[in-house]
Image (cartoon, grey):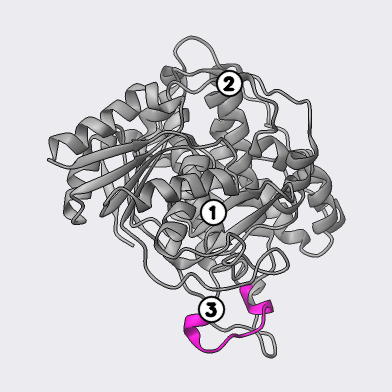
Amino acid sequence: MGCCQYFVPTEGGADAFTVEMPRVTFGRGTLSEVGERALNRGIRRAALLTDPYLAETEHFAQARSALAAAGIDTAVFSEVHIEPTDESVLAAADFLKDGGFDGIVSVGGGSVIDTAKGALVYAQYPASFDAYFAPPMGAGQPVPGTLLPHIACPTTSGTGSEVTGLSVIRFVALNVKFVLASRHLLPDEAIIDPACIDTLPAAVVASTGFDLLSHAIECYTARAYTAWAKVSPAASRPMIQGANPWSDLHAREALRIVGEYLERGVADAADYEARDCLSWAATLAGMAFGNSGTHLPHALSYAVSQMSRDFTPRDYPGGKSFVPHGLSVIVSSPSVFRYTAQAAPQRHLEAAKYLGADVRGAAAQDAGEVVSRRRRPRRSSAGRRGGDSRKNYNVDARHRCPQWSQRRWSYRG
């Protein structure tokens, strides 16, 4: 465990942490396994959730065909709202109530997966929409029990929603985002097929990459779980429990991958090594923040996204005015980390180092500036981009990014 001194015991503080995980399958072509996976979960009639744009893609068609090949009856809900709202989530819940489903498959980015999670709650346990949200927005009622089986199939490389028990939803009347959180929201399985992001435009890869970057660095620089009050009984221990050795493990690797591959993945859609690695990093960062939590950049992002009125992002479908989540997070991050580094300078220096910054000679008072101004070190001419990116970069890729071996594998949580 890195930086073990960060988790020193405190009087009255937590002395244990809990890891919550779905089953994870990663690899190119694994979207074709969704029918087999659903069948093994006892699903015979599945609700298939996506958004209007993905509904026309080959990835959605592949998932639907795999379910049909397994003999699973499906009905499609494709009216997911990008950046979901209470209204769009309740519309999906109504669809689930009336369909006689015994499971759900979500194919899409964070908006689709978050909508699926929220819809499952309100379809099975109807209540006023604010009931299951924490104060001050909601009544703080716990989600009463388990939900229908959910298989999440992400098509972007940033949110990590496929491995968390969190759903971010905007309350239209209040014009504010808030988080629905419960262990019951965790998908049962996550199928991450990096081929799904081959067709993503550069601006979308950049925005989702900023989200995963901020997830990882916020987890790594969050307050230690031992600094939070111990809770009893053990079942009441929250998922958002502060930095811990599990979140550290995944955040460090996610940061390393971002530092090495984000620029490449944005610059070249044919750089499959980079895009595969970013898909894996997004899931790693999800595993981290789903068991630790994020902090100020994500908190501040809600104000950025909700107060914008006339920003139309490049490369996003529909031509609508909104701020993509990754952009809303990253705009405040440099200033935030200059501020938070005062409380944990060593953590911020370590995060910068994993991102590839040169931290030699940096003192504690430099930590915030070093991580905020992180720049990629210059490469020698032999290592610079040119020609076939895979030819130049994949010499040791099997060691640095194991999914690049093209093998499929699973993790049972």
Q: Residues within 10 Å of mark 2 (few under 14, many from 20)?
A: few
Which residue in the structure is indicated by mark 2? 318
**Distance Cα–Cα, label 2 vs label 3:** 41 Å
Q: Residue furthest top?
A: 387
Is residue 228 inside the magenta stretch?
Answer: yes
Residue 348: x and y in percent read 73, 54
Quickly name the residue at label 3. 237
User: Along the polypeptide, which appears first: circle 1 or circle 2?
Assistant: 1
Q: Which residue is mark 1?
A: 167
Residue at 78% in and 46% down? 303
CB-based contact (under 8 Å), mark 2 and mark 3 = no
Check disc 2 and give the amino acid type: Gly
Q: Visible in this render: residue 384?
A: yes
Give the image quarter of residue 206. top right
Of badges 1 and 2, the one in the foreground is 2
Residue 321: quadrant of the picture: top right
